[in-house]
């Protein structure tokens, strides 16, 4: 292997070997040499706006900015001379002349922190003791590092109104230093273009053009601007007054199957904020509004169950865990396999899912294991699984020459996929959008077909096969005549492309005619070589299959022979499940819904938040949420991702696996005794070799669905979206006009 070429430079009398494609600032930071900067941000192009990173370089006139000056062989650099320190202080004074700064220089600031903390309650920011970013502000850190203790310029308070009308974060541009980070991250990283500089001189501020609101300007509320802001100008509504976190825990988001990496900010055993990780190999920091803002409200919801509850004739009574376990064990004891039904959420971790199926099969002998997606999809389950289990990696979008987005909108979700599509389109890939409403990809598309989903298969067929010359054929296709030229053009261009990708979104997944859409997409993949990416909300769908939490599927059976000694034809047996017959016990595990299930004598509900149903549970078992227990997920690409414990469980809530273990022990059944998550993982290794440390993506064997369930509403669209979408702390009122409210109060 050829060794990469390096050059020799000298920084502050230190000899450094470095590759030639770095700037002086990057070289310094890579070698722990401090150079202050406020406009520079990792992953953003060099900018040179704040002028604080100036250095001296032998042979160069003046004081070049280190963030824009590339290193050269033999370069001699000085970063901390007396003249540089003086110039930096002068530059910082000018920056602070339009930023409330008295507390930065106050001789009593330490006492102020100790004895006047409650002054944070003031709503308008006028000084750093009132600032939501106090103690976690880059401007504070730079002021201290430069050694500035006073300013000789008068401070001009610009008097901008604090903007609080848009959701999720507030904006006080009186604290803005116009570093441009938020504008650049919105345009260059998120590819959205919501923010720009407005006005001139002292009136210069930042925001959407033409005084539009962020919602009107198409803001995705990804929060990248808030994360990049070096001052308190942008602050998260729900966490702005918490101050500096005690700890930061990296974990995996469980809002959808993308599996983005989140950095949970924890203080006093509570998640107060969430930040992206731009070094994540899965999402590259491109988290969506749900991952960025919804987690604290969701996990700290006042609706959370804290103790077990039993239904009585006059309402619920709080009971102890011993009472709850005894009651559950008593109801399950002696129940025949066909007299019980278990509805399991695909949001659970692999470890909880494995324990779930083992608990069900060993305690009851039942195969009546139903997932919410089985009820949601009904007869269309086979087509959906075919597409979802073969979903390609998001990385293939980068090299795509042509892309079709079918029912896909990344405005408030699936951001890594959406941003990659935008980059590909701006890089020359031709994009077609098929939807029933406006999407955030329309402006970048070469053709946007907005119509009801019944016509989507015809549009797809016409694009892949071309439109016959016959006018009668055009008319018979039922397509809008205005689309014919666009379709013919796309057909020619796609047929000449070797890298073609279809993005399938929730609009297609929840469409009335999704069965036909799925079959058309499968044909495109199998016959014409299209690559399919499915953006679906079932977080751990692949984990559910790998752990065997479906009727007739055992742990490890659904995996391809790459991880197994042998593979076999795997059938998900729905025919054995009768949802019309009354049950003695129905057990709901995780975020599920009861309304489409049969009547029962006793309903057990095991989850953290209230059941979205007209039927009240007879027994409620409060569970820990994803930030309160260790585990793993398998994302849509087949990668095993870690879920890390960040806080202790809320009140008396317990992990799902602990509840199952306790009930089994009470029933004296032969379920293996697990003391923690690692012991469960060791058991999973018997079925999936190397779990959870499998470095490559997990692939799945061919699956078939055997027969339909004998279910109410068979052959009909049961709901617009699965029950999992009706929670998660996002306020639809806050994002009015963005997320679409659909049946049952669920968000799409």
Image: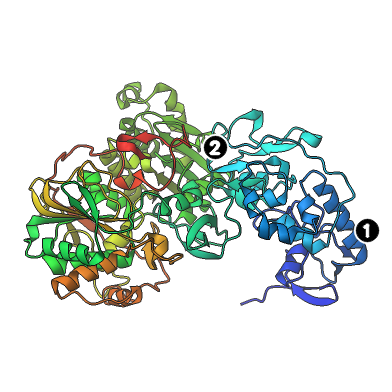
Q: Vertically, is 686 above or below 89?
A: below
Q: Residues within 10 Å of mark 2 (few under 14, many from 20)?
A: some
By what rule are the colours in the image chosen? rainbow
List the residue tagged with mark 1: 61
Mark-to-mark CA distance, 2 and 1:
44 Å
Q: Vertically, is 216 above or below 624?
A: above
- Whether residue 491 is visible to the viewer of this picture, yes or no, is yes
Give the structural element (helix, strand or loop) at label 1. loop
Place of residue 462 in the rendered image (x, y in percent of width and height, measured from the top left): 37, 34
Location of residue 30 by image quarter: bottom right
Compared across the picture, whether 281 is left or right of 593 comes to right
Q: Vertically, is 503 above or below 246?
A: above
Q: Residues within 10 Å of mark 1 (few under 14, many from 20)?
A: few
- Whether residue 567 is visible to the viewer of this picture, yes or no, is no
Give the structural element (helix, strand or loop) at label 2. helix
Residue 444, numbered label: 2
Place of residue 498 in the rendered image (x, y in percent of width and height, measured from the top left): 46, 50
Q: Earlier in the sequence, mark 2 or mark 1?
A: 1
Q: Residue at x 84, y 66 (%)?
A: 79
């Amino acid at each position: 292997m050829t060794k990469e070429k390096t050059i020799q430079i000298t920084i502050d009398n230190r000899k450094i070997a470095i590759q030639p494609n770095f700037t002086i600032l990057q070289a310094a930071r890579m070698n722990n040499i401090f150079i202050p900067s406020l406009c520079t941000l990792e992953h953003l192009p060099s900018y040179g706006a704040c002028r604080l990173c100036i250095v001296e370089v032998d042979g160069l006139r003046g004081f070049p900015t280190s963030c824009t000056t590339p290193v050269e062989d033999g370069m001699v650099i000085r970063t901390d001379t007396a003249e540089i320190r003086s110039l930096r202080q002068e530059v910082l004074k000018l920056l602070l002349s339009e930023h409330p700064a008295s507390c930065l220089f106050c001789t009593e600031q330490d006492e102020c922190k100790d004895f006047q903390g409650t002054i944070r309650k003031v709503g308008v920011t006028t000084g750093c003791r009132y600032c939501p970013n106090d103690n976690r502000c880059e401007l504070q850190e730079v002021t201290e590092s430069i050694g500035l203790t006073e300013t000789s310029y008068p401070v001009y308070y610009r008097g901008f109104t604090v903007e609080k009308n848009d959701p999720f974060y507030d904006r006080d541009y009186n604290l803005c230093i116009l570093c441009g980070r938020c504008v650049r991250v919105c345009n260059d990283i998120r590819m959205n273009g919501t923010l720009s500089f407005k006005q001139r001189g002292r009136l210069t501020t930042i925001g959407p053009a033409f005084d539009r609101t962020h919602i009107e300007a198409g803001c995705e509320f990804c929060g990248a601007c808030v994360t990049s802001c070096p001052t308190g100008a942008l602050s998260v509504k729900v966490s702005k007054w918490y101050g500096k976190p005690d700890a930061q825990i990296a974990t995996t988001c469980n809002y959808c199957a993308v599996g983005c990496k989140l950095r949970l900010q924890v203080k006093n055993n509570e998640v107060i904020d969430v930040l992206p990780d731009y070094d994540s190999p899965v999402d590259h920091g491109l988290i969506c509004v749900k991952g960025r803002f919804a987690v604290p409200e969701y996990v700290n919801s006042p609706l959370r169950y804290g103790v077990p509850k039993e239904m009585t004739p006059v309402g619920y009574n709080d009971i102890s865990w011993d009472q709850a376990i005894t009651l559950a064990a008593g109801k399950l004891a002696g129940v025949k396999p066909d007299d019980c039904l278990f509805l399991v959420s695909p949001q659970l971790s692999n470890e909880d899912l494995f324990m779930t199926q083992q608990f069900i099969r060993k305690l009851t002998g039942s195969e009546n294991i139903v997932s919410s997606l089985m009820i949601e999809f009904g007869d269309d389950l086979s087509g959906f699984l075919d597409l979802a289990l073969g979903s390609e990696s998001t990385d293939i979008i980068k090299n795509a020459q042509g892309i079709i987005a079918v029912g896909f909108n990344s405005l408030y979700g699936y951001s890594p996929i959406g941003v990659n599509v935008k980059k590909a389109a701006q890089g020359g890939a031709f994009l077609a959008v098929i939807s029933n409403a406006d999407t955030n990809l329309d402006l970048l598309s070469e053709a946007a077909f907005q119509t009801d989903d019944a016509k989507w298969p015809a549009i797809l067929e016409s694009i892949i096969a071309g439109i016959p010359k016959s006018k009668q054929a055009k008319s018979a296709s039922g397509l809008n005549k205005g689309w014919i030229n666009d379709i013919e053009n796309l057909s020619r261009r796609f047929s000449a492309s070797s890298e073609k990708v279809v993005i399938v979104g929730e609009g297609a997944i929840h469409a009335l005619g999704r069965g036909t859409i799925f079959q058309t997409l499968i044909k495109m993949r199998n016959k014409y070589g299209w690559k399919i990416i499915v953006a679906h909300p079932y977080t751990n769908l692949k984990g559910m299959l790998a752990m065997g939490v479906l009727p007739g599927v055992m742990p490890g059976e659904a995996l391809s022979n790459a991880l197994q000694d042998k593979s076999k034809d795997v059938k998900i047996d729905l025919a054995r499940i009768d949802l019309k017959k009354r049950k003695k016990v129905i057990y709901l595990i995780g975020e599920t819904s009861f309304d489409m299930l049969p009547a029962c004598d006793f309903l057990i509900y095991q989850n953290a938040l209230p059941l979205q149903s007209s039927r009240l549970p007879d027994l409620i078992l409060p569970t820990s949420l994803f930030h309160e227990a260790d585990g793993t997920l398998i994302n849509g690409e087949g990668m095993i991702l870690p879920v890390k414990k960040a806080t202790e469980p809320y009140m008396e809530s317990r992990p799902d696996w602990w509840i199952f273990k306790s009930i089994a022990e009470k029933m004296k059944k032969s379920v293996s005794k697990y003391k923690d998550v690692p012991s469960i993982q060791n058991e999973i290794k018997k079925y999936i070799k190397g779990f959870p440390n499998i470095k490559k993506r997990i692939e799945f064997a061919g699956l078939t669905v055997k027969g339909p369930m004998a279910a109410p509403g068979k052959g009909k669209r049961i709901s617009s979206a699965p029950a999992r979408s009706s929670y998660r702390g996002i306020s639809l009122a806050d994002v009015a006009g963005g997320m679409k409210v659909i049946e049952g109060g669920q968000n799409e």
